[in-house]
Amino acid sequence: MARTDRHATGSRMSRDHAPKSAFAHPRYWPVWLAIGLMYVAAWLPWRLKLWVGRRIGLAAWRFAGRRRHITETNLRLCFPELDEVELRRLVKETFIANGIGLMETATGWCRDPEHLRHRVTFKGQEHMARVQAEGKGALIIGVHFSTLDLGGALHSLFFPADVVYRPHDNPLFERFMTRARNRIFGTSIDRHDLRSVVRRIKTGHHVWYSPDQDFGREASVFAPFFGIEAASIKLTAKIARMTGAPVMPLMFHRNPDNATYTLEYLPPLEDFPSGDEVADAAKVNAFIEGAIRKHPEQYLWLHRRFKTRPAGEPGFY
């Protein structure tokens, strides 16, 4: 996929058509402030950026009681071997990592990722290079780590890709977010726009997609995730079946030094899709679980991953 596609707009489902004058209304002033703060955060010195992110995470851990409850519930379900002291420590580390993740997102959206090339180690490039040499499009499976958007920016230094995303409810922030991602990726595709995903892959583009959230009963099958039956998206196998594309697992994380990052491609999923929706979802979940176990504190445990339950089961939250 050539980099000249970076400004492609055919499948974009943003509200970029709204006139700029519409965003002068006072109701958008807090959003403008947030965007301005993100630009400032992106240009802070690295150590200061980490310090600010850590303080944001600690503040959220202390005051965001609802999110702390969700995080504690998720971690207690997925890591039953932890005692209460270890659990509380991991909850706190999760909030800190996600606070730093806000600073990383600002950096990924507001600055050229080239300035971070020296901070990246990329493993397994040969797996994607083999796909590219065959002229195929690929479905790239990412994970909702706190480093997600910075990971996308760093990935763009090595391989171009489109991205599937959920549009933001606020039209101003949606415009800002989509333009930022289109600077990193080739095209931002609304998660409901399956036709565009399929078309892009069939024409040789790579599409980054993160199937690790609970999108409800209709979009999912129940498959094991950390030993728990979890609503798991069926779309991964459907896209692979419709396109014949290899499904490429991608891991990315912040290293323990808090100064460098590792991205790693694994070989394409084998015998995928198999025709068994549950088995296919379980295979995707197994990769995601393995990636999380390497750096559990960097995962987005703040969302209700087990919100949808099998019929007759009580809710966890």
Image (tube, grey):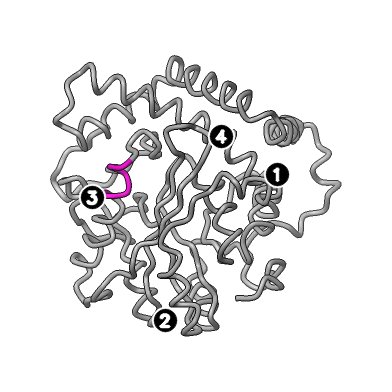
> SS class of the residue under badge 3?
strand
For the record, the magenta segment spans: 289-294
Lower sequence index among marks 3 and 2: 3
Q: Which residue is mark 1?
A: 110
Q: Is residue 290 magenta?
A: yes
Report the mark closest to the observer, 4 or 3: 4
Amino acid type of the residue that numbered disc 1 sits on in the rendered structure: Cys
> SS class of the residue under badge 4?
helix
Q: Which residue is mark 3?
A: 230
Q: In terms of depth relative to the viewer, which is nearer, 55 or 25? A: 55
> Local crowd at mark 1 within 10 Å, few (<14), some, or many (≥20)?
many
What residue appears at the point 32 percent right and 37 percent down from the top-left corner?
296
Q: Which residue is mark 2?
A: 243
Q: Which residue is mark 4?
A: 102
> SS class of the residue under badge 2?
helix
Dot 3 and dot 1 residues touching (CB under 8 Å): no
Q: Is residue 73 magenta?
A: no
